[in-house]
Image (spheres, rainbow, N blue to C red):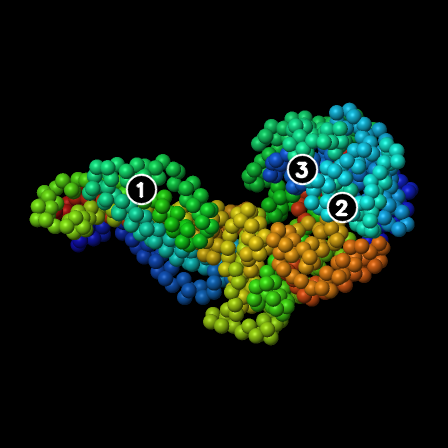
C-alpha cells in the first residue's frame, strides 16, 4: 500500500488530480457555509457580469449566483458520480464474478446479457430510462448504473477466469473451503487493482453523463447541477457567456482530475509499469 | 370595439370592402405600391400532420391551412368582422337570425363553384362533426337555409352575441361539399390534396422538408394574391431557425419559431421588423394554476398571498424579453369586454406573508410554512425558467415548491386527472369571454379533461354571471356582467394570472402587410407583397 502511495506521489499528474479533487470535495462539503442562501434564490440583478456587485462568477437570467450554483452543483455531481459508480460496481462485480467463477452455461448466458447492454448506445439508453421513470435523483443514478456496469462485468470475469486456474485457488478448493469463501477471500482481493482503476474512471464518466442529461433538461428539477447550469445558460450565451463557461470549466477540470488520478492509480498498481520500485 | 354588433350591422350594410382598398391606398401614399411576384420563404414549427382544417386545428395546421381555406369573415386587430367569403351580412332585431350574402364568382381550387350549399355543409356537418368548439356553439342553430345560391340564413334558438366570431377560418373553415359530403372526413382520399377557396393552393409537400404553396390563378379577388407562392420550410431546431432568419434565408417567422431569448438580437437588426400584434383573436393568457381542492389552496387568503408574491413585470421583461405583458385580469386586454380598470394583486411579499400568517400558516423549520408539488409545463426552456422563478418567489414567503417534470403527454394526463398541486397553463380566449374564458371558471365545466375548469373552482355567483352574459343579446348588459365577474374572480384568485403572451412575428422589412388582422399569420395573405 505504501509503495502504491509513493508511486502515486511521484506521478505529478495523479498528485495534481488528487489535490484538485480534494478541493472540489471541500467546496461541496462547505457549500452551505460559503453560500448560505439556496442556489435557486434570486440573489441579484439578472445577467450581472463576473466580479460585479460581489458576484465572483456573475449571475444568470434569473439573477441566481453562478458561483453558488457551482458549489452546490459539486455536491450533486460528486454524489451522483460516486453513488452510480458504486451501484454499477455492485452489478458488474456480482455478475462478472459469477460468470468468471462458474463458467460454462452460466458464463455464456451472463455474457450474452452483457453484450446485449453493450450493443445499445449507452447515452441513448440513459436518456430513455430517465424519460420513462421521470427525472429524479434515483432514476438518474439508476440509469447511469445500468449503462455503465457491462465493462466492469467483463473485466471482473476475465480476472476471475485467470485467477481461478491459479494454484492458490486450487489449493483452497482442495482444502474444502466453501465457494463463497474462495471468491471473497482469495480471488476478489487479487482482482481488485483493475477494478479500482476502472471505478475512478467511471466516476468521471458518470459526472459527464449526469451533466449531459441535465443539459438536455432531464436532470432532477430540484437539484442544481453543473449540466443544468450550462443547459439553462446555453440559450443566453450571446448575452451572458459566464453562465455556461464557468460550470463547463468545473466539469472539465473535475473529469480531467479523475482521469489523471485513475491513470496514476493504474500505473501504481501495475507492477510492470512501476519503474524503479522494488517489488 | 365592445359595442360591436350594432356598429357591425351598420357597417355591414354599408359594405366593408372599401377597407381593403384603403390599405392599398395608404401603402401607395407611403411610397410602397403592392408589387406582384416573388416567393415568400417562411418556416413552420412543428410540421403539421395534415393540411385539412377542421380535421386538425393546431397552430401549424392553421398557419398553412389558412392560405388554402377561408372563412366567411375575417377579423381586424380590434376584432371587428370584415367581409371575406361573405361580402355582407344582416342580423335581425331580435339577434337570432343571421343572413350572409356570399361573394360571387368564388371558385374552389378544382374549378367548382362555391355556393350556399358549401356554407351550410361546412357549418352544419363538417365542422359540427369534427370541431368540439364549433359543435358547442352551432348546436343552438335551429335552422340553416339557402333561399338562393348566394345567400345563407342561420336561425338561432336564442341570441348569442359572439356568434360572428365563429366564422373566422380558424374556427369554421369553408369546406367543399362536393368532395366531403357522405364520406368519412378524416380519411377522405382528398385529404392529401386540399381543395379550398384561398389565394394559394398546395403545390408540393416534401414531408420533413418543406410545404410549397403556389398562387391560385382563378382567385376571386382580381389581381391577387401578389405573391407567386409561399414556401414553409421545416426546421426542427430553434437555433437553426434563428440562423436562417439571421442570414436572410427565410423572410418570416412566427409563433414559437424564435425563442424569446433570441428576440433582443433580432431587434438590433435593421433589416427586420418585429410585431407582437396579430394574436388578438387568441389572446393567450398564462397563469399559475392552483388545485383548489388541495389544502391550503382552498383558502382564498393563501391564493391571494401567492398572487401578491409574484412580480409579473419581472416575468414579462426578464423571461420573455418584453414580448409578453403582465396580466391585469382573467380577461386579456385584447379580448372583448376586458375591464381596463381591472388590476390584480400588487407585487408585495410583505402583504403576502401577512395573509399567510392570518390564515394560520406560520413558518416552521427553515422558514417553510408548507410544501406544494409543482408540475412543470413541458413546452420548452422559457416555461422551465418560469417555474424556477415561481419556486424562488414563493420560497421567499415561505412556500416550498417541489418540482416535478414530465413530457407533454404526461402533463396532459396529470392535468386531466387533477393530479397536481400547482402547474403552469395557458389558454386561448378566442376573442370573447364566453368562447374562451368561461370554460376555465364555471363549475359545470369541472371535468377530467385538459383546458376545462381543472382547478376545481366553484362559485355560484361566477356561474350565474357567465350564464347571464352568454345569452344576453346586447353588449351593454354583457359588459356589465363581465366587469362584475372580473372583479369577483380577481378577488377570489381561482388561478394566479401571470402574463398575456404574444408570439412575435419577425419579418424582413421588404415584406409588407403581413399582420393586418387579429389572427395575424393565420390570415389568408392575399394582400401580402414583397417590395
Residue B163 horizontal side relative to residue B231, left or right: right
Marks counted in the figure total: 3
Judged from the image, the secondary structure of the residue bearing numbered disc 1 is helix
Question: Does residue A184 show up?
Answer: yes
Q: Is residue B159 found left or right of B409 in the rendered image? A: right
Q: Let me know if residue A233 appears in the view.
A: no
Q: Are marks 2 and 3 in contact (CB under 8 Å)?
A: no
Instruction: Give the residue at mark 3.
Output: B55
Q: CA distance from mark 3 to mark 1?
A: 49 Å
Secondary structure of the residue carrying tag 2 is loop
Disc 2: which residue: B139
Residue B301, x across and y down, in percent: 63, 70
Pointer 1 and pointer 2 on the same chain: no
Judging depth in this view, the residue of A206 and A169 nearest the camera is A169
The residue that appears at 76% across and 31% down in the rendered structure is B177
- Helix, strand, or loop for circle 3? loop
- Which of the two labelled residues, at mark 2 and mark 3, occupies the earlier sequence position? 3
Quarter of the image for residue B278 reads: top right
Which label lies toward us, 3 or 1? 3
Say which of A8 and B299 sits in front. Answer: B299
Chain holding disc 2: B
The quarter of the rendered structure image containing the C terminus of chain B is: top right
Nearer-the-camera pick, A153 or B17 = A153
Distance between mark 2 and mark 3 Cα atoms:
19 Å
Identify the disc placed on residue A150: 1
Q: Position of residue B72 (x, y in %)?
A: 80, 38
Badge 2 local density, few (<14 within 10 Å), some, or many (20+)? Answer: few
Return the chain for callout 1: A
User: Mark 1 near mark 2, Cβ–Cβ under 8 Å?
Assistant: no
Residue B270: give x, y in percent of width and height: 67, 41
Residue at image point 31% right, 39% down: A114
Amino acid at each position: 500500500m505504501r509503495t502504491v502511495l509513493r508511486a502515486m506521489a511521484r506521478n505529478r499528474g495523479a498528485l495534481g488530480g488528487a489535490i484538485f479533487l480534494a478541493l472540489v470535495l471541500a467546496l461541496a462539503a462547505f457549500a452551505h457555509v460559503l453560500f448560505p442562501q439556496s442556489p435557486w434564490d434570486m440573489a441579484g440583478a439578472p445577467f450581472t457580469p463576473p466580479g460585479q456587485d460581489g458576484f465572483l462568477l456573475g449571475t444568470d437570467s434569473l439573477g441566481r449566483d453562478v458561483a453558488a450554483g457551482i458549489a452546490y452543483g459539486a455536491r450533486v455531481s460528486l454524489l451522483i458520480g460516486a453513488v452510480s459508480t458504486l451501484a454499477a460496481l455492485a452489478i458488474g462485480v456480482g455478475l462478472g464474478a459469477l460468470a468468471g467463477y462458474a463458467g460454462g452455461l452460466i458464463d455464456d448466458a451472463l455474457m450474452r446479457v452483457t453484450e446485449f447492454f453493450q450493443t445499445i448506445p449507452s447515452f441513448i439508453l440513459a436518456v430513455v430510462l430517465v424519460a420513462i421513470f421521470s427525472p429524479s435523483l434515483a432514476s438518474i443514478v439508476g440509469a447511469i448504473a445500468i449503462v455503465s456496469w457491462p465493462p466492469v462485468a467483463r473485466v471482473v470475469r476475465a480476472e476471475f477466469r485467470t485467477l481461478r486456474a491459479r494454484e492458490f485457488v486450487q489449493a483452497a478448493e482442495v482444502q474444502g473451503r466453501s465457494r463463497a469463501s474462495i471468491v471473497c477471500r482469495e480471488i476478489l482481493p487479487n482482482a481488485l487493482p483493475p477494478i479500482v482503476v476502472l471505478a475512478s474512471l467511471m466516476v468521471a464518466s458518470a459526472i459527464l453523463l449526469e451533466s449531459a442529461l441535465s443539459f438536455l433538461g432531464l436532470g432532477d428539477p430540484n437539484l442544481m447541477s453543473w449540466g443544468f447550469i450550462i443547459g439553462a445558460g446555453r440559450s443566453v450565451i450571446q448575452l451572458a457567456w459566464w453562465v455556461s463557461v464557468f460550470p463547463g470549466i468545473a466539469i472539465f477540470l473535475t473529469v480531467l482530475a479523475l482521469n489523471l488520478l485513475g491513470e496514476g492509480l493504474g500505473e501504481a498498481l501495475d507492477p510492470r509499469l512501476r519503474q524503479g520500485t522494488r517489488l | 370595439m365592445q359595442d360591436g354588433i350594432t356598429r357591425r350591422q351598420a357597417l355591414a350594410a354599408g359594405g366593408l370592402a372599401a377597407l381593403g382598398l384603403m390599405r392599398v391606398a395608404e401603402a401607395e401614399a407611403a411610397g410602397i405600391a403592392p408589387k406582384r411576384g416573388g416567393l415568400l420563404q417562411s418556416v413552420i414549427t412543428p410540421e403539421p400532420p395534415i393540411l385539412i382544417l377542421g380535421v386538425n386545428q393546431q397552430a401549424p395546421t392553421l398557419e398553412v391551412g389558412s392560405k388554402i381555406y377561408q372563412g366567411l369573415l375575417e377579423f381586424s386587430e380590434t376584432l371587428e368582422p370584415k367581409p371575406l367569403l361573405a361580402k355582407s351580412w344582416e342580423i335581425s332585431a331580435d339577434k337570432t337570425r343571421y343572413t350572409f350574402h356570399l361573394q360571387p364568382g368564388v371558385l374552389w381550387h378544382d374549378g367548382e363553384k362555391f355556393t350556399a350549399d358549401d356554407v351550410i355543409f361546412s357549418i352544419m356537418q363538417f365542422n359540427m362533426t369534427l370541431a368540439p368548439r364549433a359543435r358547442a356553439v352551432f348546436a343552438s342553430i335551429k335552422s340553416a337555409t339557402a333561399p338562393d345560391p348566394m345567400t345563407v340564413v342561420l336561425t338561432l334558438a336564442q341570441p348569442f352575441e359572439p356568434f360572428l366570431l365563429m366564422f373566422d377560418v380558424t374556427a369554421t373553415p369553408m369546406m367543399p361539399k362536393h368532395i366531403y359530403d357522405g364520406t368519412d372526413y378524416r380519411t377522405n382520399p382528398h385529404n392529401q390534396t386540399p381543395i379550398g377557396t384561398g389565394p394559394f393552393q398546395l403545390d408540393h409537400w416534401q414531408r420533413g422538408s418543406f410545404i410549397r404553396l403556389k398562387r391560385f390563378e382563378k382567385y376571386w379577388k382580381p389581381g391577387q394574391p401578389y405573391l407567386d407562392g409561399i414556401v414553409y420550410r421545416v426546421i426542427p431546431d430553434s437555433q437553426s431557425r434563428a440562423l436562417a432568419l439571421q442570414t436572410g434565408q427565410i423572410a418570416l417567422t412566427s409563433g414559437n419559431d424564435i425563442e424569446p431569448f433570441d428576440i433582443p438580437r433580432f431587434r438590433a437588426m435593421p433589416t427586420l421588423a418585429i410585431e407582437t400584434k396579430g394574436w388578438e383573436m387568441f389572446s393567450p393568457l398564462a397563469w399559475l394554476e392552483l388545485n383548489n381542492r388541495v389544502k391550503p389552496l382552498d383558502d382564498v387568503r393563501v391564493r391571494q398571498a401567492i398572487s401578491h408574491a409574484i412580480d409579473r413585470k419581472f416575468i414579462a421583461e426578464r423571461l420573455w424579453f418584453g414580448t409578453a405583458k403582465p396580466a391585469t385580469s382573467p380577461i386579456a386586454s385584447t379580448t372583448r369586454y376586458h375591464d381596463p380598470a381591472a388590476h390584480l394583486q400588487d407585487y408585495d411579499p410583505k402583504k403576502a406573508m401577512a395573509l399567510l400568517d392570518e390564515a394560520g400558516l406560520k413558518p416552521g423549520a427553515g422558514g417553510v410554512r408548507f410544501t406544494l408539488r409543482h408540475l412543470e409545463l413541458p413546452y420548452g426552456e422559457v416555461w422551465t425558467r418560469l417555474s424556477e422563478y415561481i419556486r424562488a418567489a414563493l420560497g421567499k414567503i415561505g412556500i416550498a415548491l417541489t418540482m416535478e417534470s414530465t413530457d407533454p403527454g404526461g402533463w396532459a394526463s396529470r392535468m386531466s386527472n387533477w393530479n397536481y398541486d400547482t402547474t403552469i397553463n395557458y389558454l386561448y380566449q378566442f376573442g370573447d369571454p364566453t368562447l374562451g374564458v368561461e370554460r376555465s371558471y364555471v363549475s359545470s365545466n369541472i371535468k377530467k379533461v385538459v383546458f376545462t375548469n381543472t382547478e376545481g373552482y366553484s362559485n355560484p355567483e361566477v356561474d350565474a354571471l357567465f350564464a347571464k352574459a352568454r345569452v344576453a343579446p346586447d353588449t351593454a348588459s354583457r359588459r356589465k356582467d363581465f366587469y362584475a365577474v372580473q372583479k369577483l374572480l380577481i378577488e377570489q384568485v381561482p388561478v394566479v394570472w401571470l402574463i398575456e403572451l404574444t408570439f412575435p412575428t419577425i419579418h424582413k422589412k421588404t415584406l409588407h402587410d403581413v399582420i393586418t388582422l387579429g389572427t395575424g399569420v393565420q390570415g389568408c395573405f392575399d394582400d401580402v407583397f414583397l417590395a
